[in-house]
Image (tube, helix red, strand yellow):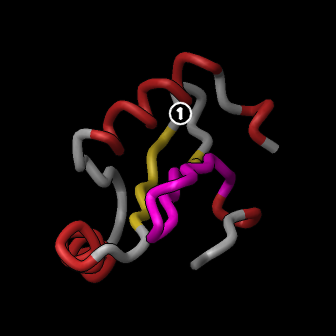
Amino acid sequence: MLEQISETDQMIGLNRHAQWDWGMVSEEEFRANENGLLVGEYLMSMYLSEHGVVFCVITEAERTKTTLSLPEEARWI
């Protein structure tokens, strides 16, 4: 549940995601994000909150919605 992530951490994650700083993603996901920017696929970032909770920021391919979630709750597109 995102209640575990402070509003400040959420805003930092969204800002990093918007600046194409993908955070703690694997090399494969990093390359997928870089390619996704070019061809219009989904983008996924992963960050660590101040209290040690990992969370994801996902932007859909259509760029109409960006969501935050915990990894176990993430809807992979």
User: In this orientation, which residue lies closer to the viewer: 3 or 60?
Assistant: 60
Circle 1 crowding by C-alpha within 10 Å: few under 14, some 14–19, many from 20: some
Q: Position of residue 16 (x, y in %)?
A: 32, 37
In which quadrant will I find the N terminus?
A: top right
Q: At 73% across and 66% down in the image, what residue appears?
A: 72
Say whether residue 20 is left or right of residue 18: left
Q: Is residue 18 above or below residue 74?
A: above
Question: Farthest residue in the top direction?
Answer: 8
> Which residue position is annotated with label 1?
49
Mark 1: amino acid: Ser
Q: Position of residue 59 (x, y in %)?
A: 48, 58
* Residue range highlighted in magenta: 57-70
User: In this orientation, which residue lies closer to the viewer: 62 or 42?
Assistant: 62
Q: Secondary structure at mark 1?
A: loop
Q: At 51% across and 51% down in the image, what residue appears?
A: 57
Q: At 24% across and 47% down in the image, what residue appears?
A: 21
Say whether residue 20 is left or right of residue 13: left
In which quadrant will I find the C terminus?
A: bottom right
Q: Is residue 56 visible?
A: no
Q: Position of residue 22 (x, y in %)?
A: 30, 54
Q: Position of residue 34 (x, y in %)?
A: 19, 69
- Tell me the quarter of the picture where residue 74 sits: bottom right
Q: Is residue 35 above or below residue 23?
A: below
Say whether residue 24 is left or right of residue 52: left
Q: Is residue 70 visible?
A: yes
Q: Is residue 66 covered in magenta?
A: yes
